[in-house]
Image (cartoon, helix red, strand yellow):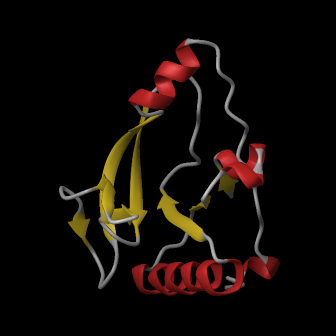
Amino acid sequence: MVTGKFLKNPKDTWDIDIVLTGIPEYSELERIMIKGTKIGFEKYNMLFDIQHHNIIPNFYPEKKIVQKIVFCNRIIKNGKIITDWSDAEKVGNNLWIINKVMPNYKQFKKISKGYKFIEPMKLNYKNNKYNV
């Protein structure tokens, strides 16, 4: 599924947030994330921020622990570290698992003030096969 600012205004963001669910094998997930990230940079000159979540993300006041699998444990933008999951557990050559509360503090604060996040756009894969 696609989430984040891209759904609201594609011109107002530097990345596209993509959340995968239900992919059981780390090696297959890693292959999809590598290829998807490569397509984003090479074809669209944009970061495809691809993560796997054990549950569909929610942006409601109720908080849940979400197990995220990420392709890297750190994000650097313009030479500055903007995300650091140094406490993540490495489970593949390029995969890390981390448990996070969702919505996070920043999202929860917005929700508390009445902000409505756009529901994620669900994407399906053809014939239950991964199309990446």
The front one of 116 and 31 is 116
- The residue at 81%/79% (across/down) is 126
Q: Position of residue 13 (x, y in %)?
A: 64, 53
**Most distant residue in the right direction:** 126
Relative placement, left or right, of 45 versus 106 is right
Which image quarter holds the N terminus?
bottom right
The answer to which quarter of the image holds residue 76 is bottom left
- The residue at 73%/37% (across/down) is 118
Residue 85 can be seen in this image: yes
- The residue at 54%/13% (across/down) is 112
The front one of 12 and 24 is 12
The answer to which quarter of the image holds residue 63 is top left
- The residue at 67%/85% (across/down) is 132
Q: Position of residue 15 (x, y in %)?
A: 60, 61
* Vertical arrangement, residue 115 with respect to residue 39, above or below: above
Q: Position of residue 9 (x, y in %)?
A: 77, 46
**Most distant residue in the left direction:** 87
* Vertical arrangement, residue 51 with respect to residue 114, above or below: below
